[in-house]
Image (cartoon, rainbow, N blue to C red):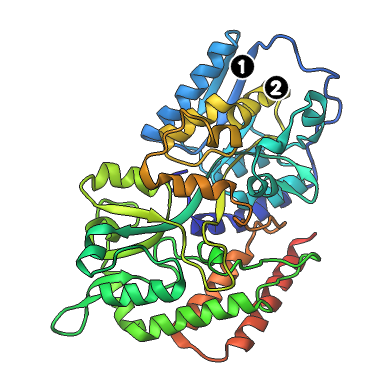
Amino acid sequence: MSKTTLRRAAAVAAAAAVVAGLVACSPGGSAGIADAAPSHLSGTVSLWHFFTGREASVVQGVVDDFEKRHPDVKVDVHAGQDDEKLQKAIASGQQIDVGLSYSTAIVGSFCSSGAFRDLGPYVKRDGVDLSDIPAAPRSYTEYKGTRCTLPVLADTSALLYNTKLLAAAGITKPPTTLDELESDAMALTTYNPDGSIKTLGFDPLMGFYENSPAHFSPMVDGPWLKEDGTSAIGTSAGWKQLIQWQKRFVDAIGYDKLQAFTSGLGQEFDADNAFQTGQVAMEIDGEYRTAFIADQAPDLQYGIAPTPVMDGLGHYGASYISGNVAGIAKGSTHPELAWALLKYLALDTDAQVALGNGLKNVPTITSALTSPTLEVDGDYSVFVDAATDPHTLTSPATSDGAAYLTTFTTMWEDYQSKGGDLDAALAKLDEDIDNEKALSGP
């Protein structure tokens, strides 16, 4: 999950919708489950997940603990299985018991099609109290009343800032408002003799690293969909003001200058990440960045603060949250073992703490978020606190895999480069999103 980004989630949306169509004619379900959970578990259960390398070892350690609790159970782990592989495998009828995805974008299509089983009967039978899951993760793991997934860690975003560069510019505290963010960024930006950017205070370009509508949404408490499922973006005064602010910020530096500078920066998850090298002084990023910095730039002096907000609109301290989801595949032949493993990964405090500490992602149950054994060093608490903030946002699931996030990003990237009639662009955005959703079904 440390490499999970909203752009990656949006990229799998179309594939999720396609696979949902493939399995729609043979939905899964949980009819006929036993009246009570087995008193003893035995057998083999498969787990498909996307982690590799060191991160896969962390997951394996937690799986080992599950096997110690249930010595007659063997977990057959398939690591390195990204969402596309998982979706195709389920659609083709391969034997998968528990599937762990890096994207909440699959929830709408997988719940509505039956690719993942309805967990409601298991939750009801076993008296599982889901209130330990904070509101946002609880909402993004179900679709139209069907809970087919549980959350297994999450990403929250915040402002990371280079303390050394801020101090050199005479800035004594991180910005809390968008006006402060822009003012500080301009003061931190330096130029080469030819006028090109040397160092950048903050890169406002939509599409740079984690800059996305989703990660910017806490700035204005931006809404996504109306109650009837149609787009709420184009008629939102907050979204319009945010886009106007961002466009003015881009124009103040120069779109072409920003593009030239950004195109020469290192890749987001490589050691030459622009924040880690000091080329960009402030950025919006997720909690996983702390692990990359510890590994790739251990001498970097930096701090973490909540995402700055627009006066009167955003809620300072809130964030955007999204993360891993896991469910029981429709073709599982060991559903009771799968349910036991899924409950352990998602709802066991010790398992969530171990995963959170090892992967440097945010747990998705309150008992783990508040556990004294959760490693919360320094400013990392900003990410943890955001996970339980009542104003923290997520993007609702749709049958087309939340493709509206991609559509919104495309519109915003076009507007930041060309400008034009913003009202017309927002009206067209709503129309496009509603048409796409209509084509994908309810």
* Horizontal side, residue 329 vs residue 183: left or right: right
**Is mark 1 in CB contact (under 8 Å) with mark 2?**
yes
Quadrant for the C terminus in the image: bottom right
* Total count of labels: 2
Mark 1 neighbour class, 10 Å CA radius: few under 14, some 14 to 19, many 20 or more = some
* Residue 237 position within the rendered picture, expressed as x and y whole percent measured from the top left: 64, 79
* Horizontal side, residue 313 vs residue 162: left or right: right
Q: CA distance from mark 1 to mark 2?
A: 8 Å
Q: Nearer the viewer, residue 395 or 106?
A: 395
Residue that label 1 marks = 44
* Residue 361 position within the rendered picture, expressed as x and y whole percent measured from the top left: 47, 41
Q: Is residue 204 visible?
A: no
Residue that label 2 marks = 334
Q: Amino acid at mark 1?
A: Thr
Q: Earlier in the sequence, mark 1 or mark 2?
A: 1
Residue 170: quadrant of the picture: bottom left
Q: Is residue 439 above or below residue 100?
A: below
Q: Residue at x 70, y 72 (%)?
A: 232
Mark 2 neighbour class, 10 Å CA radius: few under 14, some 14 to 19, many 20 or more = some
* Horizontal side, residue 9 vs residue 56: left or right: right
* Residue 366 position within the rendered picture, expressed as x and y whole percent measured from the top left: 60, 37
